[in-house]
Each structure stands twice: as C-alpha cells, then as structure tokens.
Amino acid sequence: MNSVAIAIVTWNSAKEIAECLAPLQTLPENWEVWVADNASTDETVELIRNQFPKVKLIANQENRGFAEGCNLIARQTASEFILFLNPDSIAGKKDLEKSLAEISEKPEVGILGVKLSDENGALQKSCYKFPTVFNSFVEKLGLYRLLSESQRGEYLLGDFFDHQASREVDWLYGAFMLVRRAAFEKVGGIPEDYFLFAEDLDFCFRVKQAGCKVWFCAEAEIVHKGNQSAGQLPPAWRIERTVLSNYAFCFIHFGWLKTRSIQLLDLIGNFMETAIAKVRKPDSAFIKESKIYRTFIKKALKMSKSEIFGLLHRRP
C-alpha cells in the first residue's frame, strides 16, 4: 500500500486549520499528517496540539516561508508520496484516495493536481503554461483571439481551460500538489529562492526538466478557500511579490534577454488590457488593480536579477 505524508504549512491559520485537518483524521494508516507552523502569533499551534494530537507538528520560531516549511516536513518523512496541501483547503477521503490511485497508476507522473473549487462550488483556475516569450506574445498581445475556443483551452490553459478533462499541463497552482518522492528528491525539493509565490511554478518546471510529467486529474476535487494566509498581507505587497517572483523564475531559467522580453510584453499587454477595460467597463475594479501591476512591472524592468532576489528574501 502506497504511503503518503500530507505536508501543511501554516501562518496565522487558526480560522481555517481545524476545517482542513478534521477530514484528514479519517484517512487510513498509510496516510500521515504533518504541519509546519511559521511562527504564528494567533492560536494555530495551540489549536492543533489540543484538538489534533495525532498530527505531527513542527513549530518554527520564525517565518521560514512556504517552500522551506514544505521541505522541512518532506525531509523528516519517508513516504512514497508527499501531498503539499494549503491550510485553507478541505479535502475529503474519497478524493484524496482517488488522486493517490491516479498517480500510482501513472509512474511517469511526478506531480499531480486536482480540481479546485471555492466554498460556493465555483471553479478555480489551477493549470497553466510556463511564461515563455512565445506564450507571452500570444496571450499578452491578444493574438489568442485568432484561435478557436477549444484551441485556446488546449494551448494556453489558464483562464481558457475548462478544467473538465484530465491531461498533462506545464504547472499547477500549489494549493494541492501530490508529489512522487522520487521526483521530489531528483530535483532537490521545492526551490527556496522564493519566500512566497512562484515556488510552485519553479518546482513544476524542474520536475518536468527532470523527465517527469505534471498531471491534472479532473476526477478528484477539493475545496480551496484561497488567499487566507497571504490575504493577511497588504494587496500591494502581494502583487509586488507575485510579479517579482515570476520574473525571478524567468531569470533563473530563461536568462536576461528572454526575461526582459517577457517583461516588455507584460507591460504592453497591461496597457492594452487597461485601455480595453476603460472602454467596456470604466468603473471596473480591474483597472485599479491593473495599474498596480503596471507599477511593479515597470519597477522590475529597472531592477537587476540580484536586486529582485534581494527583495524577495525580505520577510513581510
């Protein structure tokens, strides 16, 4: 029977962690549950100790970030699979076992994700293409409009993919990543270059580079509330870190020229999308958010690779 270690990283997660851990208590013995808490200042640690004594808890004395927390758990376990699960997720036994059966039957798969929905049952987008120059060119300049709806979903994923069919993808949103330990070890774990954001993107890229597949399983589904921990931080901070983390990934894997090309395409695309929104929905909240993104894209264009990484390593 395949063994699984569920790795959950928390930070001030008292409001949602009980709902996350409760259904995991009914799992069979081949599943174990671990939590790495990143120096929460609320009741997260006490709640876990008092209500879920079977959960193996690591109480860090400082906020070590998502990737470090995940790796810390993974390296203290020996299971054949590791499930990296967000604390604002609710995963039932049936869907967890279905996801394990799926990856067990596909030895070529290194990472498996499932369908995500919010508390009201609305689908969350979770499958994406890598931000290459070509992909950015097609999407940011609006050339996707030349493709049929089915072609957009097939080649671009993201907002164009209906998430109704199981298939190989480039990368998965990190709320749920069921990982084969052999693949995890092969790439040295989740990259710790990022404090928060883009580590899932980079991890999937490295796993695919190592010869394994990243697979989306549409037959299993969990609830993901979304943005509960990061939502405690200012919106501008989150947008800045998201933008800079994505460009840090590009610098690592694509080099200076391709990264600058992607940044310029992002900037042009941002101007185009904002202009269209002003015509169609002049009062849209998208316009305000788009301007914030533009500010940080421009900022990134003036920053070197080392400056970007220096900023990313600063704790909130």
Image (cartoon, grey):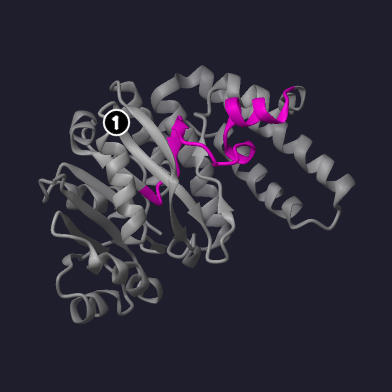
Pointer 1: what residue?
A: 106
Please tell me whether residue 30 is drawn above or below residue 309 in the rendered image.
Answer: below
Residue placed at 27% from the left, 40% from the top? 179
Assess disc 1: are there few (<14), some (14-19) or many (≥20) residues with their C-alpha within 10 Å of its C-alpha: few
> In this view of the protein, which residue sits in the foreground, 44 or 150?
150
Q: Look at the image and tell me whether residue 151 can be seen.
A: yes
Q: Is residue 58 magenta?
A: no
Looking at the rendering, which quadrant does residue 88 occupy? bottom left
In the rendered image, residue 212, in percent from the top left (x then y), is placed at 30, 25
Please tell me whether residue 13 is drawn above or below residue 266 in the rendered image.
Answer: below
> In what element is the residue under mark 1?
loop
Q: Quadrant of the C terminus?
A: bottom left
Residue placed at 76% from the left, 22% from the top? 146
In the rendered image, residue 226, in percent from the top left (x then y), is placed at 49, 60
Residue placed at 25% from the left, 37% from the top? 104
Looking at the rendering, which quadrant does residue 95 occupy? bottom left
In the rendered image, residue 208, in percent from the top left (x then y), is placed at 35, 25
**Residue 45 falls left or right of residue 241:** left
> In this view of the protein, which residue sits in the foreground, 125 or 265?
125
Please tell me whether residue 78 is drawn above or below residue 42 in the rendered image.
Answer: above
**Residue 309 falls left or right of residue 162:** left
**Residue 75 falls left or right of residue 312:** left
In the rendered image, residue 1, in percent from the top left (x then y), is placed at 13, 46
Residue type marked 1: Lys
Which segment did they paint magenta? 147-176
Residue placed at 74% from the left, 57% from the top? 285
